[in-house]
Image (tube, grey):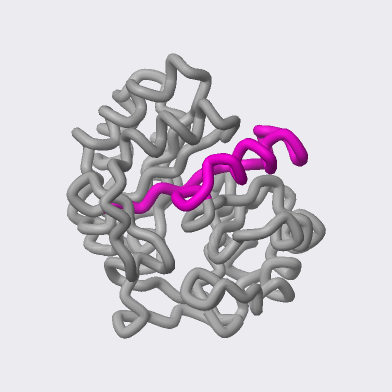
Amino acid sequence: MSGQVVRLQQGRADQKTVYSSDPAAFARKWETEGGDWLHIVDLDASFTGQQSNLASVRAITSAVKIPCELGGGIRTPEAIERALEAGVTRVILGTKAAESLDFVAEMATRFGRDKIAVGIDAKNGIVSVKGWTQETGQSALDLAIAAVHAGAGTIIYTDIATDGMLTGPNFAETERVHHAIHPLGGQLIASGGVGTAAHVTRLRQIPELYGCIIGKALYDGAVTLQQCAA
């Protein structure tokens, strides 16, 4: 956000913690400590739909060898192209995916399903969009299934109620979504709530779960990547 490394609590812009003005330095840190991927969100774009942090994204992707994925306000083919040109390996469609599965299908065909992830942010199983400011009334599970059918290779499921709280992911809902899309060829990344290595261990017990995202817990020093890999 505004070129800085920040974390929001439950997606609220007024609950912002600034960790650094050097995103590339933090990217190198997480790579050195053993991160497999870097998950980047352009929070400004999430709220406005305008990509204003691509210079920071480019600095991050240039600083590391591990792949990076980018989400936040990616709602047009041109936005996807700009993200890929900035060096990311995979883009995350959120609001636009909830609005148009045809768009997901078109982008998966155009760029390849491995380049297209759909981020599903939900509270009580209902999808929220536009930086978590609007509820759609749509079931997260139904959207996940439909997005994979449309061609998305990866689903990132974020439980809003747990995000940034460090109290543990919504294991039951994560498992439910995973079991629904895995037979269809979709891979699931769990997001929101990871606060301890034990949370990661428990997620790892979900057969063939593709991955999980750790944010605030790393920045606050509550957990290390080495602990999570053990």
Q: Nearer the viewer, residue 106 or 83?
A: 106
What residue do we see at 33% from left, 70% from top?
A: 133
What residue do we see at 26% from left, 28% from top?
A: 176
Q: Does residue 149 appear to the left or right of 180 in the view shown?
A: right
- Residue 53: x and y in percent read 65, 76
Q: Which residues are magenta?
A: 97-122
Q: Nearer the viewer, residue 58 or 66?
A: 58
What residue do we see at 69% from left, 65% from top?
A: 60
- Residue 175: x and y in percent read 27, 29
Q: Nearer the viewer, residue 173 or 35?
A: 173
Residue 84 shows in this picture: yes
Q: Does residue 187 appear to the left or right of 14 in the view shown?
A: right
What residue do we see at 53% from left, 55% from top?
A: 96
- Residue 51: x and y in percent read 65, 73
Tell me if residue 98 is in the magenta stretch. Answer: yes
Q: Would you say the magenta stretch is mainly helix, strand or loop?
A: helix
Residue furthest to the right in view is 85
Say if 5 sits above or below 60 in the image. Answer: below
